[in-house]
């Protein structure tokens, strides 16, 4: 019974020695977070994944068989950020926004008013 406190003390000292040898804290080897890099990657998601003819953004990547007005709306705002940051020209952003909105205007006339806002789907679209 008298050996229990001695064993506990030895384990405690061993743990302290291991902790003292740790050169860097966990996660310190990762590079610093870059807000610019995150913004550019998000912009490129919307810029590169837009459909080439109707410029709708897929609602869920990697499937591109439907898009929602929400995903397309986020894409429209991403184009403004890309132009402001200099990743694309203002003319490129304006052209993409105009073509996207022209498609939505034409597509809206083909559906009931409540239906077009939710999901653009089907093989005729993509």
Image (cartoon, rainbow, N blue to C red):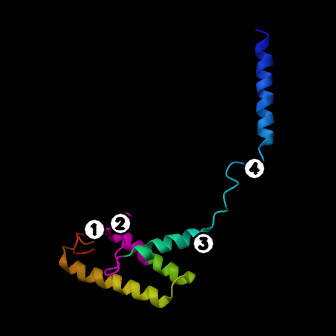
Q: Distance between the residues labelled 2 and 3?
A: 24 Å
Report helix, strand or loop for mark 2: loop
Is residue 122 magenta-colored? no
Report helix, strand or loop for mark 1: strand
Disc nearest the viewer among 4 and 1: 4
Disc nearest the viewer among 2 and 1: 2
Q: Considering depth in this image, is 117 or 56 the residue closer to the camera? A: 56
Q: Relative to residue 80, is residue 31 drawn left or right?
A: right
CB within 8 Å, label 2 to label 3: no
- Residue visible at 19% across and 75% down in the picture: 111
Q: Distance between the residues labelled 1 and 3?
A: 31 Å
Which of pointers 1 and 3 lies earlier in the amino acid sequence? 3
Report helix, strand or loop for mark 3: helix
The residue beneath circle 2 is 59
Residue stretch in magenta: 51-76
The residue beneath circle 3 is 36
CB within 8 Å, label 2 to label 4: no
Query: In x, y percent, where is residue 48?
Result: 43, 75
- Residue visible at 76% across and 21% down in the picture: 8
The residue beneath circle 1 is 119
Q: How far apart are marks 2 and 4 (CA)?
A: 41 Å
The residue beneath circle 4 is 24
Query: In x, y percent, where is residue 107?
Result: 24, 79
CB within 8 Å, label 2 to label 1: yes
């Amino acid at each position: 019974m008298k050996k229990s406190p001695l064993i506990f003390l030895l384990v405690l000292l061993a743990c302290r020695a291991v902790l003292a040898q740790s050169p860097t804290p966990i996660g310190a080897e990762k590079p610093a977070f870059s807000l610019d890099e995150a913004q550019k990657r998000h912009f490129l998601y919307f810029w590169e994944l837009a459909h080439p003819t109707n410029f709708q953004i897929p609602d869920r990547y990697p499937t591109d068989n439907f898009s929602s007005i929400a995903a397309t709306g986020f894409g429209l705002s991403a184009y403004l950020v890309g132009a402001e940051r200099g990743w694309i020209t203002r003319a490129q952003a304006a052209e993409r926004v105009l073509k996207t909105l022209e498609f939505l205007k034409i597509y809206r006339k083909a559906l009931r008013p409540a239906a077009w806002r939710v999901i653009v789907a089907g093989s005729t679209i993509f």
